[in-house]
Image: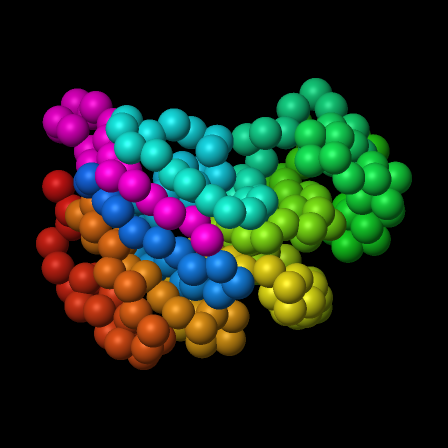
Amino acid sequence: MIHLENLTKFYHTRGGRKMIVDNLTATFPSGASIALLGRNGAGKSTLLQLIAGTIRPTSGRILSTGSISYPVGFSGSFHQDLTGVQNTRFVGRLYGVDTDMLVDFVEDFAELGAHFRMPLRTYSSGMRSRLSFGVSMGIPFDTYLVDEVTSVGDGSFRQKSVQVFDQRMETSGSIVVTHSPPMVRRMCEMAVVLERGKLVFYNDIDAALEHHDRNLALPPSI
């Protein structure tokens, strides 16, 4: 269970205050795979980082009853001058897992070849996402936060990513950001729509996608 209690996050911009979540109270149930829908700029990735604890809210708090991954696809916790192997070991030590087993898993899964032993600053964005996804999937979390990472790579890699994700979902839950309706239907059993700092929960995936489509037709959020 992940509970958002009076959660607020905004940034000051030249155009004024940009509200991401506005005094939000909501609960993501344990063990469910939940799609997080919203148009570009709605704040989906920021909300994932708030839930992960990688950024702090302006006010309010987040409570959870289990372990939560960092946002898969987000490599902000990685050090640019460390190699893929070194970054993998660093994250493994943070979460208290066997670093040798994690390195073996990531090396096999991410398909980075010689780059796995090269500094992260030499990686393309796709390679960073592969490393991030591999490290996260190699660690047992109660809830996985996934930010479009399964769209990275060729067809065979995407298929492998979905297969590994399915395996993890046998014992865990997830919050998934994706712009692909087929992926939402394939990976999720519930959905929430983020718009203008508010969340609307749906047990019906099609109803959530319809709400999301209506939002896409509206003027951009201020």
Q: Main secondary structure of the magenta part?
A: strand
Q: Is residue 169 left or right of residue 61?
A: right
Question: Is residue 191 placed above or below 101 in the rendered structure?
Answer: below
Which residue is pictured at 77% across the width and 54% down the height?
Answer: 109
The residue drawn where x is 20% and y is 40% is 22
Q: What sort of colour scheme is used for the picture?
A: rainbow
Residue 201 falls in image quadrant = bottom left
Residue 67 on the magenta segment: no
Is residue 171 something that shows in the picture? yes
Q: Can residue 155 be seen here?
A: no
Q: Residue at x 49, y 59 (%)?
A: 30
Q: In the rendered picture of this protein, how many numbered marks are placed on residues?
A: 0
In the image, residue 70 lies at what x, y percent? 55, 41
Image vertical order of residue 86 relative to residue 101, above or below:
above
Where are the magenta residues, as a range? Answer: 1-20
**Which sits in the foreground, 123 or 168?**
168
Report the quarter where the C terminus lies.
Answer: top left
* Residue under the point 39% across and 39% down: 62
Q: Is residue 8 magenta?
A: yes
Q: Nearer the viewer, residue 87 or 125?
A: 87
Q: Looking at the image, is 146 positioned above or below residue 135?
A: below
Q: Position of residue 75 (x, y in %)?
A: 58, 36
In the image, residue 71 lies at what x, y percent?
52, 44
Task: Give residue 41's position: percent from left, percent from top.
Answer: 28, 45
